[in-house]
Amino acid sequence: MQRGINQAQDMVPAAIDLSQRYGELDLPIIVMAGEGYLVAHLAPHTERFARELREVELRKVPAQGHLFHYACRHR
């Protein structure tokens, strides 16, 4: 359990470091997210990420959460 906690604590600084490099991405990107995901809400996470990218298409999957890719394989 402690190992999992330590890994989670390490994720935040790593995510902040990576966010500084979003502008370096120079390719078309599709960002998909389930609108029903209650842990990482769309506005502060997915939508902000999509705004910070250049060539991006944001696809919100209604009535789905974290595992939306199982419900919409065709997208």
Image: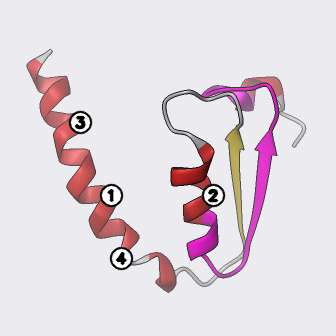
Q: Is residue 46 left or right of residue 75?
A: left
Could you tell me which residue is drawn at 49 percent across and 30 percent down? 39
- Location of residue 4 with respect to 11 vertically, above or below: above
Labels 3 and 4: the sequence-earlier one? 3
Residue kind at label 3, given as amino acid type: Ala
Could you tell me which residue is drawn at 68 percent across and 43 percent down? 33
Disc 4 crowd rating (10 Å Cα; few below 14, some 14-19, many 20+) is few
Q: Which residue is mark 3?
A: 8
Marks 1 and 2 close (CB-CB < 8 Å): no
Could you tell me which residue is drawn at 56 percent across and 62 percent down? 48
- Give the magenta part as a residue range: 50-69
Quadrant of the image occupied by residue 26: bottom right
Tag 3 secondary structure? helix
Marks 4 and 2 close (CB-CB < 8 Å): no
Q: Which disc, if any, is residue 39? A: none
Distance, label 3 to label 4, CA atoms, is: 20 Å
Distance, label 1 to label 2, CA atoms, is: 16 Å
Instruction: Give coordinates of residue 24: x percent, y percent.
Output: 48, 85
Labels 1 and 2: the sequence-earlier one? 1
- Location of residue 4 with respect to 17 vertically, above or below: above
Tag 1 secondary structure? helix
Q: Which disc, if any, is residue 20? A: 4
Instruction: Give coordinates of residue 70: x percent, y percent.
Output: 74, 24
Q: Is residue 64 left or right of residue 8?
A: right
Distance, label 4 to label 2, CA atoms, is: 16 Å
Pick out the residue farthest to the right.
Answer: 74
Q: Which residue is mark 1?
A: 15
Residue kind at label 1, given as amino acid type: Ala
Q: Answer whether residue 60 is magenta in the image.
A: yes
Q: Answer whether residue 56 is magenta in the image.
A: yes
